[in-house]
Image (cartoon, helix red, strand yellow):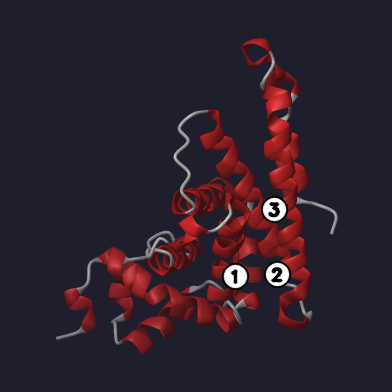
Amino acid sequence: MSLAADMTLDEMRLALAPEIALAAMFDGWSDAALEAAAHIAGIDADVARLAFPGGAMDQIDAWVASVDTAMMAEFADGRLATMPIRERIRSLVWFRLEAIAGLEESLSRAMAIQTMPQNVAAAFRQGWSSADRMWRLAGDTATDYNHYTKRAILAGIYGATLAVWKDDTSEDKAQTRAFLDRRIEGVMKFEKAKARFLGGPGGSGREHFDVARFLGRLRYPQR
């Protein structure tokens, strides 16, 4: 009996995603990468294609989901609760980077596909979903305006850090570590200052704070 016979399509997506990502270093996010991954896993390529009807973006989405799954398993022991909030976020982001270590070329190719106009909305959903999982693991229970700002800001930080990490040739990714620390420190200052923007009578300060502009500075910051 083949391995695929015991798998749902969702399980197959997660099982194949890391191998597709590895093959994408050479073949890009393509049918060739999917075939290579299926061959290694002992799954018929035609069956594997059923798990990725959306092509490259489905493959990338499965890769992101596989990292989400690994992250949630890694921190399921609750140890994050003993850390300061900035260290929780730093640990979660850094785990995700280490989970794809050596796949910088695959990441670069994935980001090129994600930024195509037809894929931007899907890429945003991927980033938002990962940010949501990070905040939940970090213990965030906000359901108000903060719920959305925290996730949007973290998605921006994570995306910017990925962009630095994929091109970072410094020893032990020191440049990326410093970059991430600066971004997190900026968020901590932002959280302290937010009350001044949103704390006016009736929350009127919100009208004077441009979230889109702030996120843009996070996404394309000065190094």
Q: Earlier in the sequence, mark 2 or mark 1?
A: 1
Q: CA distance from mark 2 to mark 1?
A: 8 Å
- Residue 115 seen in this snapshot: no
Indicate the secondary structure of the residue bearing disc 2.
helix
Q: Is the residue marked by circle 3 packed among few (<14), some (14-19), or many (20+) residues within 10 Å?
A: some
Measured from the top left, where is residue 52 in percent x and y? 38, 65
Label drawn at residue 184: 3
Q: Quadrant of the C terminus?
A: bottom right
Q: Earlier in the sequence, mark 3 or mark 2?
A: 2
Indicate the secondary structure of the residue bearing disc 3.
helix
Q: Residue at x 71, y 81 (%)?
A: 172
Query: Mark 2 = which residue?
Result: 165
Measured from the top left, where is residue 101 in percent x and y? 59, 78
Compared with 3, 161 (above or below) is above
Q: Earlier in the sequence, mark 1 or mark 3?
A: 1
Measured from the top left, where is residue 176 in percent x and y? 73, 68
Indicate the secondary structure of the residue bearing disc 1.
helix
Which amino acid does the dot numbered 1 rest on?
Leu
For this rendering, which residue is in front, 201 or 125?
A: 201
Query: Mark 1 = which residue?
Result: 97
Compared with 38, 221 (above or below) is above
